Structure formats: C-alpha cells, structure tokens
Image (tube, rainbow, N blue to C red):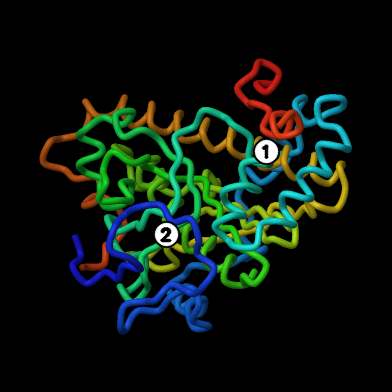
Amino acid sequence: MNSNRSTAGTQDTPTNSISTPRAATAGKSSHYDRNFEQSLIDHGIYPNNRAQKPNNWKEINDRIAQPRPSLSLPRFSDGVFETFQQTNEEALSEGKVMRTVFPIFSGTANVPNEGGLLFTNLEPLTDGTLVDARPDYYDGARPEQIDKRVRDELESVIIPSTMQHAPCLPNLFVEGKGPDGSPAVAKRQACYDGALGARGINMLHSYGTDAETMYDNNAYTISSTYHHDGLLKMYTHHLTQPKAPGGEPEYHMTQLGAWALTGSPEQFRQGASAFRNARDWTKEQRDELITAANGRVGNMPIETSALESSSYSMLSPSTNENALLESDTSADELS
C-alpha cells in the first residue's frame, strides 16, 4: 500500500462530530481546499457532468421514483413529519445530523454499512496529492460475500479500510452537513467518494472478462448529500473508457434529483422514498456483480491478476419516532 497517503486522523473509527474542517497532512489537498475540485477535474473526475449521463439513467430514475408504503398515510402522518422537522432543527452539528436526522429518512434496511472510516487501504485515485476519503456513511458488502481470491486481487480498489472486516465494495455514500457546513464541500466529498466506489465496482464488474467489456457506461454507484437546511441531493457515478489508449478512465457525477425534506410531508415522502429505493437498488447491483465475479473465479489463470489485465495504471504509492424509523425490511418495502 502507498505509504505517502494522507490520513485525517489516526484510527479508522467513526466520528460523531465533524463540524470543522479536517486537518490535511502537509502537501495534501482536502475537500476544504478550493483547488480540490480542480484537481479532480484535471484527473478526469467530473462533478455533475450532465453531458455524460449513464446508459441506465432511465432505469435508475424509474426505480427511485417508486412509492414506499411505509411512507404513505396513515403510517406517515403530518404529525410524524412535524417531529422530523423538530429533530432536524435541533441538530446543531454535523455529527448530530448524521446521528438523529439521517436515520429517519434512510430507513432501517438490513444492509452492511459504516461511517467515519478513513479509506486508507485504497490506491490513490489521482496523483496521490488528495487526502484519503472519509464518508460520513456508506453501504457495502460483507467481505466474506466476495471470493477470497477476488478480494486478494482487487483489495486496493474494493477494500476501503485497513479494518478489513468492515463493509467493502462501497457503492452508496452519504455526506452530511450541519447548519454551518458548506454544501460545496459536501458535493466535493460526494464526488470523491462516488468515484472511488465506481472504480471498485467497475473493477469487480470486469473481473475475469475481456477488456472490451470493461466499460458499459452504466452507473452502479450513488452518492447523496444532506444539509441541515433540509436539502437532500442524490447523484449517480459511472466510468467511461479512456480517451486515448493506455490512458485513465473518466468519471462522471450526475445529479439524480434534489428534495427539500423539511418543506412538506409530500416532499419528505418523495425524498425519503428516493433514498431508500437507492439503497435497495445499489445493494442489488452489488450482490449481482459479486455473484457474477465469484462465478468467474475458476476461469481465471492463477498467474493473471485482474488489476494487471485492466486498463488502469494504478498510481503508486417515542411513537412518532418509531413511525419515522419504520423498517424497510417488511414485505411492503420489497415492492
């Protein structure tokens, strides 16, 4: 692993409050630097590039627009919505937003997840000058779901933390902000998170296949930002092939939608439904890609590494409360 990576802390442990900029190691650019976004763009990682929507754009939009019975009347009443508004108003820090507000609209689906872990185990996405990512929240897979040979070969792109029992292959991310947090910073973080997730998903998708099948221009990764002002935004992330032979792939972040969750009960229902549907959808993509990659393990020559055969050139080194938290694992949520 690259010994020159920056860490914004000393341990891979969740953080409860991140209301001030995280200190970056000397010489590293963080999300709080205005040149961070330009560095991403210079390396082919484009924030909200509407010109490159994924091929499965309509499929994703149709899926997130599906209603959720747990968010319909009478299960989600105006009184429950007002409780959400109050909870949001009382969250005065980023940590409290993620602890008390986020769980209300995210639901309680049984999906492996983590938050606040430094992604110190991943190869640099650019030239090694950016700090390690540290998503406030992400969904991933249990490591044991992925064949050990696949994990070993793709470790530097799918195992994000040195705590290797933490969820891997992340493809759904959330960055939250408190009242004084910057939406611009949240978007930079989401862009970075999503690109890392899309890279890992793409490598797993192409594991054991011909190079020609490496880029299908579909998105399998979604990121979200939530600000204390009530605005939830969601984005897709996908890769396209390098512009020149031997070059690096390009990464595209495209906004799926925005919802003012504190605006009205209906806006909350729409936004929360979109997010919960996105959680379901990204889990389905992970599971399908893992199953396919595991099935190809026996066909891979032992001496051939999936990373070596790819086109990547890796750079070196209360009742209301219960109603709000209605489980998404019930039968009506599978529709």
Q: Position of residue 83 (x, y in %)?
A: 79, 43
Q: How many marks?
A: 2
Task: Name the mark on residue 134.
Answer: 2
Which of disc 2 and disc 1 is earlier in sequence?
Answer: 1
- Badge 1 crowding class, 10 Å Cα cut-off, few under 14, some 14 to 19, many 20 or more, is few
Q: Select label 1 or label 2 by which is in front.
A: 2
Question: Is label 2 in a helix, a strand or a loop?
Answer: loop
In the shown orientation, is residue 60 left or right of residue 67?
left
Query: In the image, what residue occupies the spot 79% across and 54% down?
Result: 260
Residue linked to disc 1 = 59
Task: Name the mark on residue 177.
Answer: none
Tell me whether circle 1 and circle 2 mark residues in contact (CB < 8 Å): no
Query: In the image, what residue occupies the spot 57% across and 71% down?
Result: 185
Query: In the image, what residue occupies the spot 60% across and 22% down?
Result: 329
Q: Residue furthest front?
A: 318
Q: Quadrant of residue 323?
A: top right
Query: In the image, what residue occupies the spot 26% across and 52% down?
Result: 156
In the shown orientation, is residue 73 left or right of residue 7?
right
Q: Position of residue 189 (x, y in %)?
A: 51, 65
Q: Quadrant of residue 179?
A: bottom right
Q: Position of residue 164 (x, y in %)?
A: 26, 43
Mark-to-mark CA distance, 1 and 2: 29 Å
- Badge 2 crowding class, 10 Å Cα cut-off, few under 14, some 14 to 19, many 20 or more, is many
Determine whether 100 is above or below 192 in the image: above
Q: Residue furthest left?
A: 303
Nearer the observer, 306 or 324? 324
In the shown orientation, is residue 306 left or right of residue 115?
left
Looking at the rendered structure, the kind of residue marked 2 is: Arg
Looking at the rendered structure, the kind of residue marked 1 is: Glu
Visible in this render: residue 236? yes
Nearer the observer, 53 or 334? 334
Question: Is label 1 in a helix, a strand or a loop?
Answer: helix
